[in-house]
Amino acid sequence: MATIVGGIGTTHVPSIGKAIAEKKQNDPYWKPFFKGFDYVHYWLARTKPDAAVVFYNDHGLNFFLDKLPTFAIGASGEYRSEDEGWGIPVSRPVPGDADLSWHLINTLVAEEFDVTTCQEMLIDHAVTIPMALMWPSAASSDRPWPLKIVPVEINTVQHPLPSMARCLKLGRAIGRALESYPRELRVVIVGTGGLSHQLDGARAGFVNKEFDALCLDKIVAEPDALTRYSIHELVELSGSQGVEFLNWMAMRGALTGRVSELNRNYHIPVSNTAAATVVYDNQPAAERRAA
Ligand code: DHB
Ligand code: FE
């Protein structure tokens, strides 16, 4: 049985990659953001996960608007990235846990989540930036990564998008699947993107501090309360790219135990984005919620 050690939520803004390449972590602009990862590093060093399930949205590197699955899971032993045109160095490949991937895929399909299975999948900045933030020394050296990943893509790009409720349920189904994994494994769940931001259109630059605070408060103990927001309300309240919060809902869903917030950092802006970094503890509970 896999042990779900907790969850991490983080923004994935590409310019973070440029700041890392230029070693600007202590510049006045970047410091308030990078400081938020001190706790993440401390917590990861203590919990030592063997694998990470990473909920993210692809921005056109692996999938494009012509074929964009609502939910897709990688089932590869390695994930490469490529130049996306942001002017940042291409990240080194990340090892995948293909055995865990197939267990999740088999269990999800049996539970009527008909996910797209990808035996090859390029990972974009929505995976590589969080990896570089969480494991900076592995990302910037050729030493082995300390863990393997299972990337889970959620369409937050082309409407119709899956609902908040559906993403929470996907996360819960993955949480249950992890609990039935036959091998001992310590797993961290990661949700990337958000919080509020809008990159284009008349509201470009839009952020909503109050709504972000509400989401960060509710997601810990009352994630179901957030399912009252329709996708269109979410676009209205958090911006057209703020809907990346769907990845956070899935991350929260996969935490099947008693969840508490260990750390929160919120900083406006990083590029056009209200940046948030959180760490959640997950204590196994005797009773689990059905999907
Ligand atoms: C930005 C934010 C994103 O989530 C993204 O995918 C690309 C760019 C930004 O704020 O610049
Ligand atoms: Fe994004």
Image (spheres, rainbow, N blue to C red):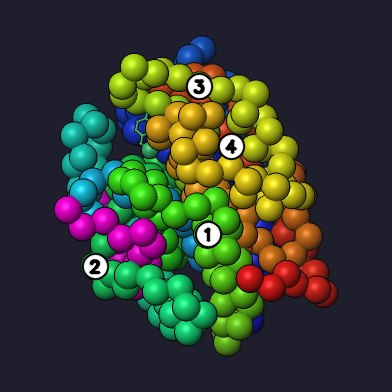
The residue nearer to you, when weighing 284 against 156, is 156
Tag 3: amino acid: Val
Label whose residue precedes the other's in the sequence (3 or 2): 2
x then y, percent, for residue 78:
30, 66
For label 3, count other residues whose C-alpha is less than 10 Å away and answer few (under 14), some (14-19) or many (20+). many
Query: Where is the C terminus found, in terms of image quarters?
Result: bottom right
Q: Does the Cβ of the disc 3 residue fall within 8 Å of ligand 1?
A: no
Q: Mark 3 falls on what kind of element? A: loop
Q: Mark 4 falls on what kind of element? A: strand
Left or right relative to 206: residue 36: right
Residue pointed to by mark 4: 277
x then y, percent, for residue 244:
45, 42
Residue sitting at x 53%, y 44%: 230
Label whose residue precedes the other's in the sequence (2 or 1): 2
Q: CA distance from mark 4 to mark 3?
A: 16 Å
- Specify the quarter for ligand 2: top left
Residue sitting at x 74%, y 65%: 257
Quadrant hosting residue 40: top right
Q: Which residues are magenta?
A: 66-81
Residue pointed to by mark 3: 207
Residue pointed to by mark 2: 120
Residue pointed to by mark 1: 166
Q: Main secondary structure of the magenta part?
A: loop
The residue nearer to you, when weighing 257 against 16, is 257
